[in-house]
DNA sequence: CCTAAGTTTTTGGCATGCCAAATACCAGAA
DNA sequence: TTCTGGTATTTGGCATGCCAAAAACTTAGG
């Protein structure tokens, strides 16, 4: 790469150095802590206990074997993500979302996914679209999703992520992934709920068909309505999920 | 609420303390630094110079009169936002977006705004919708937007933000604001461009009409197409904006 | 037993200082 | 002048330690 700041003359050497990007940046403790804490937060069931979950800088630094500094930086990052909220002289609380917030996030997700569907109809390759069916290969009239909720739930999420990826839009991918991480706290109980599972599969197949048909408007509509359906479902049946 | 951890007895005091939230958290240096740096970054014209813009921790800490610690935490936050990228032993660079990235962001924006329009048709009050016209009160056949690009550009942005706010969806509001901050780097040259300004006003009015008519599908479509139009415009005429 | 004043402990915020890697700089050799 | 080797400097990463506010705990008084 033509570096404008090369000290003096530029040796020949041509483009011999291409592809020699830059060796492993060996992620810093800050980033390691960020990843570790993020995973820990996502793994814990925040909505299980009535009391707010708290984190302690010192305890974490000892637990992870690093000083408080990188921990604090990681916490600052997580706060930007909306996963935690640090209250001055009280502590760091893991944020709990209300039902209304979850519904709101799912609506935004619907918006992004419908745009992804729209884009896919004009740019994706047919084989990639068809490949989306593979996520549901193991399900059918003889093996109903509602009888394997856990498994279907995984396939479900994988399908949605693959779908959005087909849009080849990094922004859509990133934004939906972020939203999914937040919504996921309501796991099992929502996305993979039996009564909703029944209607889910046909809707997914409907989306795929519209994509294959390159019907932009229809694909967009089906993708949107499908996810908005989830939002409506959570809004209606979300009582059992306190907060 | 039956709090199991109340030290001893709980005084009467009933609900006298409602609405007495918690006095000013006196924002920390970390947050002050975050705000200050964010504003500074947004204010500078990142796309003006060929060389990447760099930030220096120590210089900033001296400039802002605080130690490096809160500065570093602020930088970590800005990195999460995607405004800067710190490279291990080289420095902190202000991220420059490519045209493709900007276009991608505008598409996501279109998705979110069209969802906002959809929600508005079912929940917003008529008077609030009609009030959207006020942003363009100063423009008309006798005072064309293209003759007052700067002013119209401001009204434009204010309109879009007000529109999204009407959806009463915090998530949509936050996400679009974030996107707008990034896209804005391409200011003047894009959003307020003369040739696009001409078609912008009628489209805006069209959106408002659809909202007033409570035509969900039409409002959604118009909002989407309007912003997608901007994306297409930037994609086609974005050459002059280097990177 | 209950209240309330006083004391200790906890907790996030921040300043400092050192380290290693990467760079910039400089002098000496060809 | 042009390399080359070595040295000083710059820069982000991190560990430590102190501070003040707030909570938790203790104890004297009624």
Image (cartoon, coloured by chain):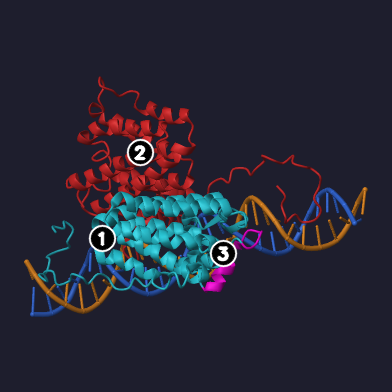
Chain colours: A red, B cyan, C orange, D blue
| Residue B29, horizontal then vertical, whole percent | 44, 69
| Mark 3 lies on residue | B57
Q: Is residue A53 visible?
A: no
| Mark 2 lies on residue | A218
- For marks 3 and 2, give the CA distance: 51 Å
| Same chain, labels 3 and 1 | yes
| Same chain, labels 3 and 2 | no
Q: Earlier in the sequence, mark 3 or mark 1?
A: 3
- For marks 2 and 1, give the CA distance: 27 Å
Report the residue at 43% width, 50% height from top: B108
| Mark 1 lies on residue | B124
Toward the viewer: D8 or A97?
Answer: A97
Is B56 a magenta residue?
Answer: yes
Q: Nearer the viewer, mark 3 or mark 1?
A: 1
Judge left or right: residue A59 versus residue B4: right
- For marks 3 and 1, give the CA distance: 46 Å
| Residue B178, horizontal then vertical, whole percent | 43, 58
Q: Is residue A137 visible?
A: yes
Instruction: Please rate how many residues cluster around mark 2, counting C-alpha atoms within 10 Å: few if below 14, some from 14 to 19, many from 20.
Output: many
Toward the viewer: A220 or B80?
Answer: A220
Instruction: Describe the element under mark 3 as helix, strand or loop.
Output: helix
Question: Count the marks: how many?
Answer: 3
């Amino acid at each position: 790469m033509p570096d404008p700041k090369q000290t003096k003359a530029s040796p020949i050497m041509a483009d011999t150095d291409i592809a020699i990007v830059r060796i492993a940046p060996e992620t810093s403790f800050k980033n390691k802590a960020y990843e570790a804490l993020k995973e820990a937060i996502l793994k814990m069931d925040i909505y299980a206990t009535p009391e707010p979950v708290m984190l302690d800088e010192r305890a974490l630094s000892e637990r992870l074997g690093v000083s408080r500094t990188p921990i604090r930086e990681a916490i600052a990052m997580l706060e930007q993500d909306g996963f935690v909220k640090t209250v001055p002289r009280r502590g760091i609380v893991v944020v709990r979302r209300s039902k209304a917030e979850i519904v709101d996030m799912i609506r935004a997700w619907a918006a992004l996914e419908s745009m992804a569907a729209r884009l896919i109809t004009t740019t994706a390759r047919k084989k990639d679209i068809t490949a989306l069916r593979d996520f549901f290969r193991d399900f059918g009239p003889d093996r109903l999703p509602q009888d394997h909720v856990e498994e279907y739930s995984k396939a479900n999420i994988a399908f949605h992520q693959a779908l959005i990826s087909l849009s080849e839009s990094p922004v859509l991918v990133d934004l939906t992934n972020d939203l999914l991480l937040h919504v996921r706290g309501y796991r099992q109980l929502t996305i993979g709920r039996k009564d909703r599972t029944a209607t889910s599969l046909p809707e997914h197949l409907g989306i795929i068909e519209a994509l294959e048909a390159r019907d932009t408007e229809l694909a967009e509509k089906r993708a949107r309505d499908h996810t908005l359906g989830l939002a409506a479902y959570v809004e209606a049946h979300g009582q059992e999920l306190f907060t």
